Image: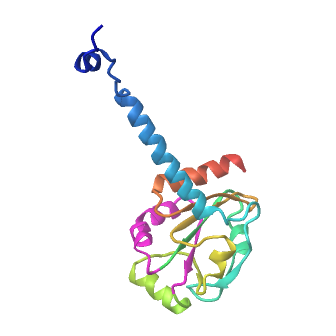
Amino acid sequence: MSEPDPAAAAAAAPVSAKPPRWRRYARDLAFVVAIVLGMHWVQTRHVPDGEAPPFVAPSAAGGELSLAEWRSAHAAGPVGLYFWADWCGICTAQQGSMDDVQADWPVLTVAMQSGDAAAVSQVLTARGLDWNTAVDADGRIAARYGLRGVPAFVVLDREGRIRSVSVGYTTEWGIRARLWWAGLMG
């Protein structure tokens, strides 16, 4: 009996085919989605459930702003809280989107760790922004909301419950969709 030829055995062995291209793309897409969702969970894991934490803060326009009073003036539907900082480049990139959203939805902005009311007022004036802004000079308001980064957008339903939180750049349509959804759900 003769020994089998290794070259012939290798040629006769079935060749394992690569998975179809669409499966590789689907696997890669699932991996990216898992990473994005994991990052979102990490960034928002400390956000409280239910009622939004109340606050009273200095207003960039002077005086004080109370979340409860501001919400009561906009009780017909959902509202947004937009946390930003003067030193945040992504916040600067998102300014136009926030201006456009504020034309259609009530949004209270919160300037986190950007100085006192006078400093925040100067930033708003220099950037040509007519935003109703609470000043969170030491970051305590953001901490009560479990936020550790900016920009962050928090959607409250008409009952004052937190319905959605996003941290990082969010498109204008993403913000609008969150507000619209909160209006349907609450």
Viewer-proximal residue among 80 and 85: 85
The reply to whether the magenta stretch includes residue 26 is: no
Q: Residue at x 41, y 65 (%)?
A: 96
Residue 112 x, y percent position in the rendering: 55, 80
Q: Quadrant of residue 77?
A: bottom right
Q: How is the image coloured?
A: rainbow
Quadrant housing residue 148: bottom right
Quadrant in which the N terminus is drawn: top left
- Magenta stretch holds residue 101: yes
| Image x and y of residue 30, in percent | 48, 41
The reply to whether residue 83 is visible in this rendering is yes
Horizontal side, residue 22 vs residue 43: left or right: left
The image shows a total of numbered marks equal to: 0
The residue nearer to you, when weighing 164 against 11, is 11
The answer to whether residue 154 is visible is no
74 shown above or below 77: below
Q: Which residues are magenta?
A: 86-114
Residue 117: image x %, image y %?
56, 89
Looking at the image, which is closer to me, 126 or 87?
A: 87
Q: Is residue 89 above or below residue 47?
A: below
The residue at 39%/68% (across/down) is 93
Please provide percent x and percent y for residue 57. 66, 84
Residue visible at 35% across and 24% down? 16
Residue at coordinates 50% horizontally, 53% vertically from top-left? 36
